[in-house]
C-alpha cells in the first residue's frame, strides 16, 4: 500500500471516529430541549457528555491537521470554498462548549445557555451532512483546483437530503447514548426516541440510495459495485439489523455499538465511492477532481506524518479508554455534575 492511499484511509478513519464519538454529543444536544422534563433530567443529559465532548473533538482537529499536511490542495479548497459553512460549524461548536461550561454555574441565565447548547449542536450536526453530500456529489472546480461555485450552490437538494439524514443519524445515535447513560423515565424516553429516530434514519438511507443512483457521477456508481463497495453495503445492512435485534432484546450497549457501526459503514461507503478523489469535480469543471495521488504532499512529509501517527494514535486511544472507563456507568440525578 502506498503512502497516499494509507493517508486516505487514515483520514477516513479519523472522520469515522469523530462521527461516532462527537456524533452522540451532537445528538444529545439536539434532543436536549425535547427529552428533558425538569432540571434534574437536563443535568443528567449534560453530564452524559460532559466528561467526553472535548476529547471527542480531538478527532476532528486531528483529521483537519492530517488533511492539511497530507493533502494541502484539498485542505485549501475545502477551507476556502466552504468557508462560510465551516465558520458556521466552528461557531456552533464554540457555542456548545461555552454553554456546557457556563450552564451549571450561571443559573440566572439558564434558558440562554440551554438555547445555546441546542443551537450549537444543531448547526454542526446538519452542516456536516451537507458538506458530506457535496463531497459525494462533486463540486465545480477551476483548473487550479479552487472551488468555482457559491455558498448557495452547496445547498442543493442532494446535499440537503444528506444533511437531514446526517442530522437524524446523530439524533438517533445521541438518543441511544442517553439511554445507555441514564435511568428512570429519561432512560425510557430516550429508548422510545431512538426506536423511531432509527427507523427514520433507515428510511432516509433507503431514499438516499435511490437518489444516489441518479445524482452522483459514474465513477462513484462503479466503485460502489466493486468488491469493497459491496463489503461496505453489507456492513451497513448488517449493522442496521444488529441494532434492531439488540433494541428488541433491550440491550442498550449492543444498540449503541450497532449504531456506531452504521456510521462507520456510511463513512466507508463515501470513501470507497469517491476514490481516487478526495473531492470529485462536477459540471463544467476544468479537471476531474482532486485525486489522492495528485494532491498529496511529498513522500518525506507523508513518512514523517506516519511515524507521528504511529506514536500519537495509541496515546489518544489510551486516553480515550481511560476517560470512558473512569466515567462509565449510568448517571443519576444526584450525581449529575454539569
Image (spheres, grey):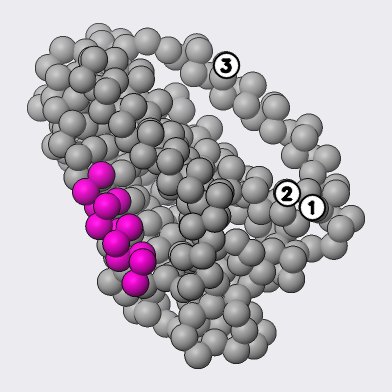
Which residue is disc 1 drawn over? Answer: 3
- 302 is higher (above) or lower (below) than 43: below
Q: In the image, residue 145 lies at what x, y percent?
A: 63, 80
Residue at point 48%, 73% (across, down): 218
Residue at point 67%, 84% (across, down): 144
Asked if disc 1 and disc 2 are in contact, CB closer than 8 Å, the reply is yes
| Front residue (pair 178, 107) | 178
Local SS, label 1:
helix
Disc 1 versus disc 2: distance between alpha carbons? 5 Å
Q: Residues within 10 Å of mark 3 (few under 14, many from 20)?
A: few
Residue at point 69%, 26% (across, down): 315
Q: Nearer the viewer, mark 3 or mark 2?
A: 2
Per the rendered image, the range of residues in magenta is: 202-214
Asked if disc 3 and disc 2 are in contact, CB closer than 8 Å, the reply is no
Q: In the image, residue 62 lies at what x, y percent?
A: 63, 45
Which residue is disc 2 drawn over? Answer: 6
Q: Quadrant of residue 72?
A: bottom right
Q: Quadrant of residue 309?
A: top right
- 148 is higher (above) or lower (below) than 25: below
Residue 322 is tagged as 3
| Front residue (pair 296, 89) | 296
- 152 is higher (above) or lower (below) than 231: below
Amino acid at each position: 500500500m502506498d503512502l497516499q492511499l494509507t493517508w486516505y484511509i487514515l483520514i477516513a478513519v479519523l472522520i469515522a471516529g469523530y462521527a461516532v464519538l462527537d456524533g452522540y454529543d451532537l445528538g444529545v444536544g439536539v434532543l436536549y430541549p425535547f427529552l428533558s422534563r425538569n432540571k434534574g433530567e437536563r443535568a443528567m443529559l449534560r453530564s452524559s457528555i460532559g466528561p467526553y465532548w472535548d476529547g471527542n473533538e480531538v478527532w476532528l482537529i486531528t483529521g483537519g491537521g492530517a488533511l492539511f499536511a497530507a493533502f494541502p490542495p484539498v485542505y485549501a479548497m475545502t477551507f476556502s470554498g466552504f468557508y462560510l459553512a465551516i465558520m458556521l460549524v466552528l461557531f456552533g461548536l464554540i457555542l456548545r462548549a461555552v454553554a456546557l461550561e457556563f450552564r451549571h454555574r450561571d443559573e440566572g441565565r439558564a434558558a440562554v445557555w440551554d438555547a445555546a447548547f441546542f443551537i450549537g449542536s444543531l448547526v454542526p450536526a446538519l452542516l456536516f451532512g451537507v458538506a458530506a453530500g457535496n463531497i459525494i456529489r462533486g463540486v465545480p472546480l477551476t483548473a487550479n483546483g479552487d472551488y468555482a461555485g457559491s455558498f448557495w450552490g452547496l445547498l442543493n437538494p442532494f446535499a440537503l437530503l444528506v444533511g437531514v439524514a446526517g442530522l437524524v443519524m446523530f439524533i438517533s445515535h445521541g438518543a441511544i447514548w442517553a439511554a445507555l447513560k441514564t435511568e428512570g423515565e429519561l432512560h425510557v424516553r430516550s429508548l422510545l426516541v431512538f426506536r423511531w429516530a432509527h427507523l427514520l434514519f433507515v428510511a432516509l438511507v433507503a431514499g438516499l440510495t435511490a437518489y444516489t443512483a441518479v445524482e452522483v457521477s459514474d465513477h462513484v456508481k462503479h466503485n460502489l459495485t466493486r468488491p469493497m463497495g459491496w463489503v461496505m453495503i453489507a456492513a451497513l445492512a448488517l449493522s442496521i439489523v444488529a441494532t434492531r435485534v439488540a433494541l428488541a432484546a433491550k440491550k442498550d450497549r449492543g444498540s449503541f455499538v450497532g449504531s456506531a457501526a452504521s456510521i462507520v459503514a456510511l463513512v466507508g461507503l463515501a470513501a470507497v465511492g469517491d476514490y481516487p478523489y478526495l473531492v470529485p469535480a462536477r459540471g463544467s469543471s476544468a479537471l476531474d477532481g482532486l485525486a489522492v495521488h495528485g494532491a498529496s504532499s511529498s513522500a518525506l512529509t507523508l513518512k514523517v506524518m506516519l511515524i507521528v501517527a504511529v506514536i500519537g494514535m495509541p496515546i489518544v486511544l489510551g486516553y480515550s479508554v481511560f476517560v470512558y472507563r473512569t466515567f462509565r456507568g449510568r448517571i443519576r440525578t444526584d450525581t449529575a455534575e454539569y
